[in-house]
Amino acid sequence: MEVFNRRVNTIIDWYEGITGTHCEPIEAMSKESYVGDLSMSIPPFLIKGKETILDGTYHYYAVAEDSAGNLSPKFKTTITLDRIAPVITDFHLTGSTGAPVTTSQKIVMNLEVSDNIGPLSMRYKFSYGTWTEWQTVASGKNRLSLEGAVPLPSQYQLFCEVKDGAGNTSSANALIEANRSPLAPDSSVGSPSGLVFSTAPQLLGPLFVDADGDTLAASCFLIRLLVTEEDGSTREEIVYSTGIIPGTDSWIYNVPDGVLTCDNDYPANYSWTLRYQDSFGQWSQWSAPVYFTLREPVLTVSVNGKGTGTVMSQGGEIDCGGDCTETCSPGESVTLTAFPGLSSAFLGWSGDGCSGTTPCALSMDFDKNVTATFAVMGDVNDSGTVDLADAIITLKLCAAVATTETIVKAAVNNDAQLGLEEGIYILQKIAALR
C-alpha cells in the first residue's frame, strides 16, 4: 500500500523512424497518478547548424517508474509527421502501342510519382468527364489502360491528382493527339467503271482525304470477280488484291497483264474497292464497289454508196465486203485502205476516227464503226448513172459557174477533184465511147 505514497515518474523514450535517430529519455511528468492526454512536442534536429523538424514517423515509448524504481510495462505509440506532397516526376499519355499519338479510344496513362512516407492514392478525369474514385497507386512508375470517348476527338486531355496518407495532394495533366482514320474513298469518281476495253486496266482512285490533314502513306485495291451460275445466281470470288502500295501517288495502279480475263464470248464482270492508309498507319474503310466489264474492242466496217469497192486492213483481218468485223486487242493499231471497184470512185471515210480519202489509221481503244462510201465514176450528182446532167454540172465547175445541184466528187482518177478530165470522161460515157 505504501507505493501509493510514493511519487510516480513518467519517462518518454522515442526515435524517428525514417532516419532512425534516437532521443534521450525525457521525464514527462512526476506525480502520484495521471489520467488524460499528455501533450508532447516533436523535438528539432540540428542540421548544418540549424534546428529542423523532419517529416517522418515518430515512435514513442512510455514507462512509469515508482520511487522504488519499479518499471511498468513499456507502452508504444506512433505518429507520422507528413507536410510534403507527393512528387509527380512524369505524367504523359500514349496510344495502346506506346506511340505518342493514339489511333483509337484506347490510351495508356503513364504516371511516375514518389513520396517518402505514403501511402499513395490517385484519381483522374478526362476534360469532358468527372473524377474517378480514389484508388491505390504505387510509388514509382505506374501504367494504367484507359478508354476515352467515341467518336474519336482530335485530342484527349487527362487530369490526375495524387495524395499521400496525410492528404497532401499533387496534380498534373497531359494531352495526346488522336489520329482519326482517313475518309472512305468516294468511289463514284474513281475508274474504271462500266465497259472497259483493256486486258490490264489502270485503277484510278479518288483523291485521298484525311480528317486530320495527314498525308497519304499507302493504298490497297481489291478486285472481285462476279461469276454468274447457270441458274442466274451470282457467286463472288476474290480474284486479285494489290496488297499495300506505298507512295504519295499510289491511288493509281496498273493491273498487270494476264491477271484479269478479257473474253468477248464470256465477258467477266468485275468490281473494285479501295482503301487508304495515312502516315500514322490508320486505314480507311473500303470504298463502295465500282463495277466494270472487260471486253476487247470490235471494229466494224461497212461499204456504202452507189459505186462498188472493198476495204482491207493491213494484215488482212478486214476484207469488206466479205469479212467486215474484227475483234482487236485493246489499243491495237489498225490501218484501213479503200479500193474502189471497176468504174467506181472512193468518196471518203465516215464514222469513228476516219475521214478524207487516204488510208485511215485507228487505235482500237473502244468499239469503232467505219463506213467507206463509193460512187459511180463520173456520177457527180449521185443519181446512180452517168448522164447529161453530170456533164452540165462538170462544165459549170470548170467554168467556175455557181451551181446548186448535188455534187459528189466521183473523180475518174480518185483524186477527189472534179475538172476537165471528168467532163471528157462523162461525155465519152454518154456517147458510149467508154
Image (spheres, rainbow, N blue to C red):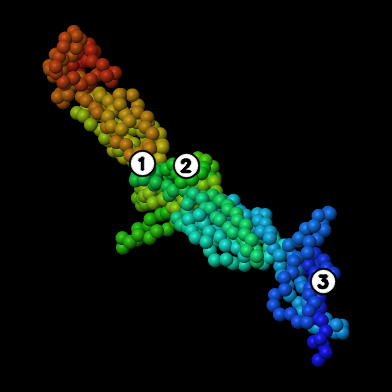
- The front one of 128 and 12 is 12
User: Residue at 59% across / 59% down in the picture?
Assistant: 161
Which element carries disc 1, helix, strand or loop? loop
- The front one of 27 and 140 is 27
Mark linked to residue 198: none
Residue 88 picture location, percent across and down: 65, 56
Q: Earlier in the sequence, mark 3 or mark 2?
A: 3
Quadrant where the N terminus lies?
bottom right
Q: In the rendered image of this protein, does residue 89 appear above or below residue 203?
A: below
Residue 14's quadrant in the figure? bottom right
Q: Which residue is mark 2?
A: 252
Mark linked to residue 26: 3
Q: Which residue is mark 1?
A: 297
Q: In the rendered image of this protein, does residue 419 appear above or below residue 120?
A: above
Which element carries disc 3, helix, strand or loop? strand
Which residue is at the far bottom? 1
Q: In the rendered image of this protein, does residue 66 appear above or below residue 265?
A: below
User: Residue at 74% across / 69% down in the picture?
Assistant: 40
